[in-house]
Image (cartoon, coloured by chain):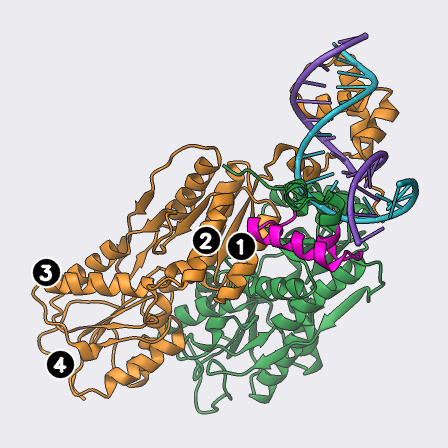
Chain colours: A green, B orange, C purple, D cyan
Amino acid sequence: MKKSITIYDIANESNVSPSTVSRVLTGNERVKPETKRKVLEVIEKYNFRPNSLARSLLYKQSKMIGIILPDINHPFFSMLVQKMEAKALELGYTTFLCNSMNDPENESTYLQTLLDKQVDGILFLGGRINEVDSNEIYVAEMNNTMEQVPVVFVNGRMDNVNAHIVKTDESAGMYEIIDLLWNFKHRKIAFLGGLKGVSSRKIKLEAFHDAMTRHSLEINDDWILDGDFDIESGEELAKQLLYMKDCPTAIVCVNDFVAIGVIRTLQQFDIRIPDDISVIGFDDIYLAKYFPPGITSVTQNYNQLGAKAVETLVELINGKRPEKEWTIPTKLVVRGSSKMVQNDKSVDN
Amino acid sequence: MKKSITIYDIANESNVSPSTVSRVLTGNERVKPETKRKVLEVIEKYNFRPNSLARSLLYKQSKMIGIILPDINHPFFSMLVQKMEAKALELGYTTFLCNSMNDPENESTYLQTLLDKQVDGILFLGGRINEVDSNEIYVAEMNNTMEQVPVVFVNGRMDNVNAHIVKTDESAGMYEIIDLLWNFKHRKIAFLGGLKGVSSRKIKLEAFHDAMTRHSLEINDDWILDGDFDIESGEELAKQLLYMKDCPTAIVCVNDFVAIGVIRTLQQFDIRIPDDISVIGFDDIYLAKYFPPGITSVTQNYNQLGAKAVETLVELINGKRPEKEWTIPTKLVVRGSSKMVQNDKSVDN
DNA sequence: TTGTAGGCGTTATCAA
DNA sequence: TTGATAACGCCTACAA
């Protein structure tokens, strides 16, 4: 099928040596303009391009960055990955995407595959670096990986793994949310969703506690429910909430998907959003703006987050010493799902 | 940083020759159990793994598949890509993702990059293979690419490019939609969205015409509006529709995003979905199920589509002769956004 | 300015 | 059963 053509072929046809062709290709050394022209002609003619595998072998760098993530089908990751790819390209790297599908074994396999393929560095998102308690084996594996190639964690960390970290300020985002709700006179606030033991829930929940306490707001533990990160979970948890005698006036969700589920379920029970209950999401996915009544959410500044992660990794690759940990600010986006509490109204069921 | 360790190191430490180490690694030839054990021990000790670049160079195959697509951030593609990756992995290949961001220049660059990286085959989605009129330069480029490596088009084609094609039966999907609407007694049907000159619009629109004619339904050209494939476009087009004296009772959208936009706008104008107007989408993205009132849509059978595309490509790589063109059936999913026309109701404005 | 030779890490062939 | 050698495609000293 593919009679792949090499510098030797080009050299033959141009009546020069392979090294001269190579020189023309790299431009690192000078070649007589005339021979150069001749060689370029032949290169053009055959549409020749050097085998980057052979080059990588020689240079000991592949100009590839590996990205391990749980699931590209989640808008948070697909958005982030898109930004990362763009930044990597800008810096002369291509990216190698690996969906672990949240299976730690897949993560291990991919980690190994990426090393085999000689990527110059790895960006790790979600999965094991998002577990509150890190599994010893995975810690060992990560550390072993990091001996071979630089690794940057995005929005996560692992105990006993001294990786560089780039993350969004999820805590600050949560403070903003509670501040908003406080200003909107909400005093009865719930926190819904997220898997127990997953740090993106834990971080937000801790900030939730802090912020509530700071405003001297009482925390009702019945209103703090864990589940998962998807729409179904939001629906499920909202129902649980509705069975309770006392209901909150505002619900903070671990992400926008949960918020969507919550909103759907509440509406099915004829509870109006935001008139009866305010609902807040997190991540500001594309749909947050469009899902009626528009979801108040916290944007993770995908562009900055992705770019900084890639930049940090590339600096490490180049032997520089970037910040060990870098935090990207978040920003609250207020939309229709939240509003000021109306004194003349109350929710009972 | 990375004092990369080679079979020579392993050979030295095990007091055998590099070739023996290689034999242990590949398992292609027999080695004395005792030496094998010894070598494996050292391999284990250093956590050694062979450099796959070097292997690829020798084998002239990288076990990598390139995927070029417009934008991973669109649920249609992210879902599809996820399935493709899984299937590729199953067949022993890793995937190399490239977001062209709908820029033909990026497509060209990536095509070249993938060849440079010696991928064994390329899956091409969207972009230039989705243009009704193919640009000559891109045609030439595609043909040139196909001389070097097998290429499979997914849901697209190009004039004068004789590539293998795997696609969903978008026409059949549209027939199903019109049949449904017919059974629901709709007689006034609109078609909204999609860029003119993009084939995924053209195919659906042609099927729309066919199906309408088949049912002897009159087609009102004012109700056939083009725009884009996103939510904003759906909103825009719905407004245009509302300005007209006569309004359809059902709106068929080029995809779910457009449908979401249409539904939003109609609801803002106090038009009830589906009581006043039925709205149909296409693609059955994750959110179609959850966006109130639930969007009736056509699923593209992502799993089958992705798997078949990868299988076809891998067969080509292995010198087999798969079907030149393969069509995956679609399936209509009926949800809350469509219903039977109520005779006692009419929509005027 | 250009050519020769050696090496990047691996595997396959051939000989021992 | 094992080792030496050449080859994959490219690049860079070094020599000419």
Q: Which mark is residue B214?
A: 3
- Subunit under mark 4: B
Do the residues bearing badges 2 and 1 touch, measured as CB atoms within 8 Å? yes
Q: Is residue A273 visible?
A: yes
Pick whichever of labels 2 and 1 is earlier in the sequence: 1
Q: Which residue lies under the disc numbered 1? A: B111
As for residue A30 lying within the magenta part, the answer is yes
Q: Which residue lies under the disc numbered 4? A: B346
Q: Position of residue B60 (x, y in %)?
A: 61, 36
Q: Nearer the viewer, residue B155 or B34?
A: B155
**Are both tags, 3 and 1, on one chain?**
yes
Q: Position of residue A46 (x, y in %)?
A: 56, 48
Pick whichever of labels 4 and 2 is earlier in the sequence: 2
Residue beneath the point at 20% across and 87% down: B244
Q: CA distance from mark 2 to mark 1?
A: 9 Å
Q: Which mark is residue B142?
A: 2
Pick whichever of labels 2 and 3 is earlier in the sequence: 2
Do the residues bearing badges 4 and 3 touch, measured as CB atoms within 8 Å? no
> In the rendered view, does B35 fall on the left or right side of B305?
right
Residue beneath the point at 44% across and 66% down: A261
Disc 4 versus disc 3: nearer the observer? 3
